[in-house]
Image: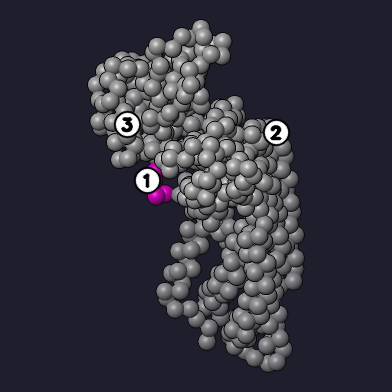
Amino acid sequence: MIYFERWKVILILVICTLGVLYSAPNVMGKDTVAWLREHTPSFFPNQMVNLGLDLRGGSHLLLEVATDTVIEERTQAMVDQTRAELRLAKIGYTDLGLNGGVVHFKLTDPSQEDKAKDAIREMDRDLNISVSNSEFSLRMTDTKIMERKRAAMDQSIEIVRRRIDETGTREPSIQRQGDNRILVQLPGVDDPQRIKNLLGQTAKLTFRLVDETASLSEAQSGRVPPGEEFLPGASQEGHPYVVQKRVMVSGDTLVDSQPSFQDSQPVVSFKFDSAGGRRFGEATRENVGHLFAIVLDNKVISAPVIREPILGGSGVISGHFTTQSAQDLALLLRAGALPAPIKILEERTVGPGLGADSIKAGATASLIGLGLVIVFFVLSYGLFGIFANIALLFNIALIFAVLSILQATLTLPGIAGIVLTIGTALDANVLVFERIREELRLGRSSISAIDAGYGRALSAIIDANMTTLIAAVLLYIFGSGPVKGFAVTLTIGIIASIFSAIMVTRLIVIWWMRATKPKVLPI
């Protein structure tokens, strides 16, 4: 005798009910969904499936990371490190400089050659050191260069992701392309210029002392004192300054930054970690009364006078900010500085018209496919075909419910996955119904034939769907972009179709059998 335990019946009903509830917002208008969000508890289903760039429209950006800049900065730092190491070891040298990515210097005392090699190796063991007539040449190994470029790319992708997430953009697609490019797709972005401005800034923040005795006119003509540099103001009316190259405090120790107001003017408040707060406190305590330049990407935002030591590890950046620019600067500082500048190579704006056409075409294909499947099953299996079609509707509801709960992004390939699921969702019912027919031909009773049909077809159903499920999982793991969208909807559809075929149709058949007690099965 076929039956379901009570807990199984309750579980099936709960899953089907939740499926209908969570898929319902996707067939409602936006105004209805907005009303639900405003007038119903937060736990009530009110989320729609996110649409991808090809359906919703938005921005498509191709970025290039200047990874060579990372190597240049590292080799420039090697010059300062070499100078410090040689002085610490009391080794005489001349002509220390940088040429073509190679640090070179000459010893004044050739007998100190071995001592100099030891000092350089202690500084960095990943350097190629060549010596000729007491002239040293230091260069990074090819392996180290590749490691630093790879690390710069990984860090750039992570920081780009943080910056975009801070803007509230839903389901952005950020992918690495080649050795130094990043593909960014932003569905539904209505202000791409702001995103470009945020991504185009390196956001390297430093705090440096101002040389108040230096002549600005001489600095503008190129005569800058050693160890200092001439930096312009961040805005057109901003004041230029001659600042020390030595960084007193770096922005990489920031833990938070928020837009705020001070004296009715937009400002950005910031907070350091313990190490950064300690250095900031020491720098301000030792330089009370001096100008302290706040430098962002080699431009001076402001240079306030240090009135008293700032020991709390926090402060305020003031300048010619608007409310929006203060919010953007706070966002950049929170997300962190890019290790290298980023250049926008390609920009495309995808209009929502293409998405509307794609949605309409996908919906048309889905409805036509659904209608043909329903008609075919009714003609082939009669009343049992109607039962299978009811389960198919629950199957589609479950797919959209899972997409809503996961807040997955539906793309055009994803719609293709749903259409394919509709076409194959009833395969399990075909196996069951054909098995029932076979059992009836062997002379079994109606109840026995149904019991055997569902019981003996189960292994075939699992085997048939498992191979497709494995393929879908592999597509998701090794695919990217559109391929993943197809794999997600296909995977959800396979699992939902197995559930609806084995559980939902069987429950409907059991209720019908108990209600009508037929002598002959209409199959």
Q: In the figure, is residue 103 to the left or right of 7? A: right
Q: Is residue 407 above or below residue 509?
A: above
Q: Main secondary structure of the magenta part?
A: loop
Mark 3 Cα within 10 Å, few/some/many (few <14, many 20+)?
many
Label 1 SS: loop
Q: CA distance from mark 2 to mark 1?
A: 44 Å
Of residues 23 and 291, the one nearer the viewer is: 291
Most foreground residue, 329 or 9? 329
Disc 2 marks which residue? 346
Name the residue at 32% across, 31% down.
Answer: 280
* Mark pair 3, 1: CA separation: 47 Å
Q: Left or right of 32: which side holds 492? A: right
Mark 2 or 1 closer to N-term? 1
Q: Is residue 510 above or below residue 273?
A: below
The residue labelled by disc 1 is 41
x and y percentages locating residue 382 in the rendered image = 70, 71
In the figure, 322 relative to 499: above or below? above
- Circle 2 packing at 10 Å, graded few (<14), some (14-19), many (20+), is few
Per the model, the C-alpha gap separating discs 3 and 2 is 40 Å
Whether tag 3 and tag 1 are in contact, CB under 8 A, the answer is: no
Q: Please give the residue where the numbered disc 3 appears in the rendered image.
A: 280
